[in-house]
Amino acid sequence: MRIGEVAAMAEVSVQTIRFYERRGLLRKPKRLPSGYRYYSPDTVKHVRLIKQAQGLGFTLNEIKHLALLREPHLDNATEIRAIAKAKIQSINNRISFLEKMRDELSCLLDACGCGTGHPKCIISK
């Protein structure tokens, strides 16, 4: 299938497909005699997997590393599991940080006199 078909089926842009190729996330496709790239139907699944991994918070470098570990001739389930656990810890750390930021901002707003007739705002000091 051609690049436009892959992009449409994977619900990404053609530029995204080319970007993934440049980053080494997708194998270089075969070329037809006409010069057009020819992609296997598995490419659509692979692009969707990349997008799903990005949605889970993995960087493109992490996704590339995970893809290399998933090669059929390698037995790296332990390493893949460790990477996933590390990502969960990273997400938990971010959640904790964001909760602290929310709590601090809430305290500032609670102490703020804006709109209540107080002359000074502690937030804009």
Image (cartoon, rainbow, N blue to C red):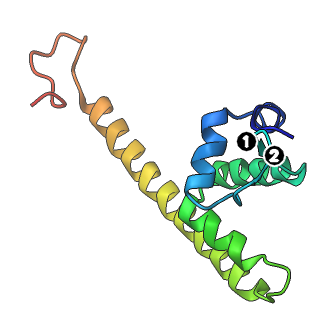
Furthest-front residue in view? 33
Q: Quadrant of residue 81?
A: bottom right
Quarter in which the C terminus is drawn:
top left
Front residue of 94/23: it is 23
- What residue did someone put label 1 on? 35
Residue 48: x, y in percent?
78, 47
Residue 36: x, y in percent?
75, 40
Position of residue 101 in the picture relative to residue 58 (left or right): left
Please tell me which residue is depicted at 81% across the width and 89% down the height of the picture: 75
- The residue under label 2 is which amino acid type? Leu
Residues marked 1 and 2 touching at CB (< 8 Å): yes
Q: Identify the element where label 1 is drawn.
A: loop
Please tell me which residue is depicted at 65% across the width and 59% down the height of the picture: 25
- The residue under label 1 is which amino acid type? Gly
**Up/down of 86 relative to 59, above or below:** below
**Up/down of 32 relative to 125, above or below:** below
**Up/down of 59 relative to 41, above or below:** below
Please tell me which residue is depicted at 32% across the width and 31% down the height of the picture: 110
- What residue did someone put label 2 on? 32
Residue 100: x, y in percent?
40, 52
Residue 53: x, y in percent?
69, 55
**Up/down of 90 relative to 39, above or below:** below
The answer, for residue 27, to whether it is visible in the render is: yes
Residue 73: give its label. Answer: none
Quarter in which the N terminus is drawn:
top right
